[in-house]
Image (cartoon, rainbow, N blue to C red):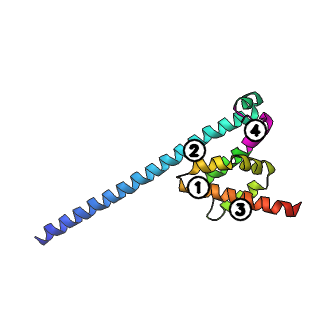
């Protein structure tokens, strides 16, 4: 009887281990699929931004009414940089604590600051409900504010 109990216990342990490993594998596969989807969607967005930012006739169709196409094209180039940093951050390629440094470097660029002044609120609205995107947006917003506070002192 003791041998039977031991065999049953071992079988149950193997079954439980297999179930746990299987569940972990399914979670990992789902995470990897989400990352692949993120890359594909970002690639589509970057392609669209590249097309708009290099074709003035096309940019004229999409530019806000109060903005000329040349300015819009410049701002879209800044958006491309921000989108690339956002993807790197979402995929875990920005080391912990380094996002503020990258954001500060982006905001050293006048065109990035102009983009953020014009479209930062829109990005914040897009990020609502996504904790990581909200954090990313807050960090970029803080970098823009820090840069604008430092700007008059440097002038």
Mark 4 → mark 3, Cα distance in angstroms: 26 Å
Marked residue nearer the N-terminal end (2 or 1): 2
Q: Position of residue 33 (x, y in %)?
A: 48, 46
- For disc 3, the marked residue is 101
The furthest residue to the left: 1
Depth check, mark 2 against mark 4: the one in front is 4
Whole-percent x and y of residue 124?
62, 51
Magenta stretch: residue 67 in it?
A: yes
Q: Earlier in the sequence, mark 3 or mark 1?
A: 3
How far apart are the two marked residues, 2 and 3, measured between alpha carbons?
23 Å
| CA distance separating discs 4 and 1 | 24 Å
Q: Residue furthest right?
A: 155
The quadrant holding residue 153 is bottom right
As measured in the structure, the alpha-carbon distance from the residue carrying label 2 to the one carrying label 4 is 25 Å
Q: Which class describes the residues within 10 Å of circle 1: few (<14), some (14-19), or many (20+)?
A: some
Label pair 2/4, CB-CB below 8 angstroms:
no
Splitting the image into 4 quarters, where does residue 48 fall? top right
- Does residue 4 appear to the left or right of 108 in the view shown? left
Q: Secondary structure at mark 2?
A: helix
> Residue at (66%, 63%) from the top-left corner?
98
Q: Position of residue 109 (x, y in %)?
A: 79, 52
> Mark 3, mark 1: which one is toward the viewer?
1
Q: Which residues are magenta?
A: 62-77
Secondary element at tag 4: helix
Q: Which residue is mark 4?
A: 72
**Callout 2 touching callout 3 (CB < 8 Å):** no
Task: Looking at the picture, tell me which residue is in the foreground, 66 or 111.
Answer: 66
Residue where numbered disc 2 is placed: 39
Which residue is tagged 1?
Answer: 134
Earlier-in-chain disc, 4 versus 3: 4
The residues bearing labels 3 and 1 have C-alpha atoms spaced at a distance of 17 Å
């Amino acid at each position: 009887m003791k041998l039977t109990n031991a065999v049953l216990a071992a079988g149950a342990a193997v079954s439980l281990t297999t179930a746990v490993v299987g569940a972990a594998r399914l979670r990992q596969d789902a995470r990897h699929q989400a990352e692949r989807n993120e890359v594909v969607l970002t690639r589509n967005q970057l392609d669209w931004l590249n097309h708009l930012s290099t074709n003035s006739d096309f940019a004229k169709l999409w530019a806000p009414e109060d903005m000329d196409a040349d300015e819009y094209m410049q701002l879209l180039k800044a958006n491309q940089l921000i989108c690339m940093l956002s993807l790197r951050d979402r995929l875990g390629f920005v080391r912990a604590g380094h996002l503020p440094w990258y954001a500060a470097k982006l905001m050293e660029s006048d065109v990035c600051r102009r983009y953020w002044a014009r479209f930062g609120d829109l990005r914040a609205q897009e990020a609502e409900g996504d904790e990581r995107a909200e954090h990313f947006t807050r960090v970029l917003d803080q970098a823009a504010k820090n840069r604008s506070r430092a700007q008059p002192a440097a002038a």
